[in-house]
Amino acid sequence: QSALTQPASVSGSPGQSITISCTGTSSGVGGYNYVSWYQQYPGKAPKLMIYGVSNRPSGVSNRFSGSKSGNTASLTISGLQAEDEADYYCSSYTSSSTLVFGGGTKLTVL
Amino acid sequence: QVQLQESGPGLVKPSETLSLTCTVSGSSISSAYYWGWIRQPPGKGLEWLATIYHSGSTSYNPSLKSRVSISVDTSKNQFSLKLSSVTAADTAVYYCARVDPWFFDYWGQGTLVTVSS
């Protein structure tokens, strides 16, 4: 199965908003509301930031939000902070009862 | 508090079988969750490997299906991964995680497995 498509890198200045896209197919991202997003710092395990396309786990800042349109899901981070600089990965359930990750996006806070 | 801890050899020889165990605390492995393995080669992205339910129902990454096996031991609150015929390309940090269908809500800290003679 092919990985979901994410931009390799995005950047933004403190206080700005950025959006990371995650493109799949109609048998994955487009067919189910099972898209999740993870934040990963170097040398650390990933942390769940968004599940079910747009739900935030307890303790995750409301500056993080998720959405989906067709076969593309998006993660938006508003009020960018230095601590948001990390790698971000999307994931989706597929019609083959499998899970797939995106290639990852490196967020740089300028 | 849910915690997961990977354990197993940090070095495996080419062509041998990689075996890892994940010990779960704070959550019964027989509860209504799935359990899974994910890996990350050095400097690269995440790759889902396999998922299992306590009943034994499994799902595997098609690209590895012929080499990977996941199992669960409810008596020890553990689940395990076996990856056969390993090569240098299987060198990675291996994570175990709880799967609340279908997202990974709790992760282990990860364990680096190097394939080398």
Image (tube, rainbow, N blue to C red):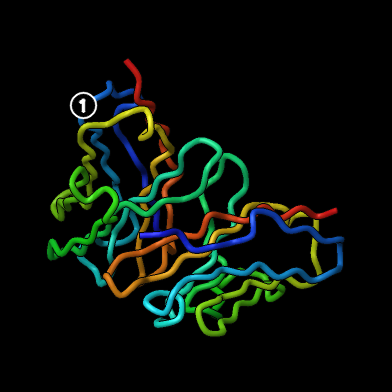
- Disc 1 target residue: B16
Q: Nearer the viewer, residue A27 or B9?
A: A27
**Residue B50 x/y as whole percent:** 28, 55
Type of the residue with mark 1: Glu
Q: Residue at x 27, y 70 (%)?
A: A97
Which quadrant, please, contains the N terminus of chain A? bottom left
Q: Nearer the viewer, residue A103 or A34?
A: A103
Q: Residue at x 18, y 61 (%)?
A: B58
- As drawn, B10 above or below B108: above
When asked about the image quadrant of residue A83, the answer is bottom right
- Describe the element under mark 1 as helix, strand or loop: loop
Q: Is residue B5 left or right of residue A110?
A: left
Q: Residue at x 39, y 58 (%)?
A: B2
**Residue A36 x/y as whole percent:** 49, 70
When asked about the image quadrant of residue B12, the answer is top left
Q: Nearer the viewer, residue B3 or A50?
A: A50
Give the number of callouts: 1
Q: Is residue A47 left or right of residue B101?
A: right
**Residue A76 x/y as whole percent:** 69, 73
**Residue B79 x/y as whole percent:** 22, 50
Residue sticking out furthest to the top: B117
Q: Residue at x 58, y 61 (%)?
A: A6
Pinpoint the chain carrying mark 1: B
Dot 1: few (<14), some (14–19), or many (≥20) neighbours within 10 Å? few
